[in-house]
Amino acid sequence: MKPRLFLSRKLPDLAMQRLNEAFDLRFNPEDRALSKKEIMEGVKDAEALICLLTDNIDKEVILSAENLRVISCYSVGFNNVDLEAANERGIAVCNTAGVLTESTADLTWALIMATCRRISESERFLREGRFKAWEPLLMLGQDVHGKTLGILGMGRIGQAVAKRAFGFDMRIIYHNGGWEVGSLPYEAEEVDLDTLLKESDILTLHTPLTPETRHLIGKAQIELMKPTSVLINTARGAIVDEAELIKALKDKRIFGAGFDVYEQEPYLPPELLALDNVVLLPHIGSASIETRTKMGMMAIENALAVLEGRIPLARVN
Ligand code: DGY
């Protein structure tokens, strides 16, 4: 008999095929996020759950699923899962660490370029029919090459972002919250958080969201940043105090921000949407066909490994 797995939302086709082969699959047939009640109903008799970063897998959900042995996150982030409750029940929690590193680093660079060179704003200007002539002062941005790239969180994604900076002749500095970073194949200097904030021309966030990193970038930290600097976030929205960021952008205390993630996703404050010095994306860091398929295959393999008593590719508890 195949083990029962509940999937909270449809995944790319190849992953769906594999799920159907390997599991007694129950899944949400509608292309919408499920409510907590619906997730509880779905996971009731399941031995495995594949969930999204938007599903709140809290204690109540975990306790309601008596047969559950593995929660396999279709994401590298797992801040949506109550790890303590999972530990209490002896449920393995797995993620898709590794397979989305390069795609997320690519998108981080798209945001760096777009924010520094005002790409979205320039395109809006052109589409609105306002481009009348080449002008010496039209849409002046910040150079990227030769600048200092600051990386907060020098894990897999932070390192992949740093690797790409090599072609731009950048100085790389980073802060990793005291966690050891092995040897790097390029020159990069470890600094304390204040130095990172003061010296970065481009500050990019790649730390997980934990109680310690929530609002790590707030008023005091933004005040240390250069007025010409840009802040990039492809990690988790709540690492930044969004209200303070909006104030700083309004007052032009920093040059701009490029964001893929938000504090209360998918809600975006109207004040943020109204600003021109921001580039805003709908959480698409890993959204390539190849990567989303690999994430599906990895989430499936993680679930199977736990159920079959093997070591999963990435377990977080
Ligand atoms: C993740 O995996 O945590 C990303 O935010 C989405 O792929």
Image: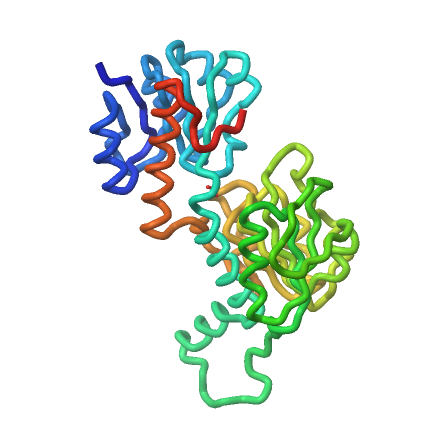
Q: Is residue 220 visible?
A: no
Residue at point 36% right, 19% down?
307
> Looking at the image, which residue is at 63% across and 58% down?
231
Tell me the quadrant of the picture where the C terminus can be found.
Answer: top right
Q: Nearer the viewer, residue 308 or 164?
A: 308
> How many numbered marks, from 0 up?
0
Query: How is the structure coloured here?
Result: rainbow
Q: Is residue 77 above or below residue 195?
A: above
Q: Position of residue 258 (x, y in %)?
A: 55, 59
Residue 190, can we see it? yes
Apparent side of residue 174 relative to residue 115 in the rendered image (left or right): right
In the image, residue 272 above or below residue 100: below
Q: Is residue 210 above or below residue 138?
A: above
* Position of residue 105 measured from the top left corner of the image (x, y, whole percent): 50, 55
* Percent coordinates x, y for residue 293 in the rendering: 32, 44
Task: Determine whether, in the image, residue 98 is placed left or right of residue 263.
Answer: left
Q: Residue at x 50, y 70 (%)?
A: 121
Quadrant showing the N terminus: top left
- Specify the farthest residue to the top: 66
Q: Position of residue 73 (x, y in %)?
A: 43, 32
Q: Quadrant of residue 38?
A: top left
x 58%, y 66%: residue: 166
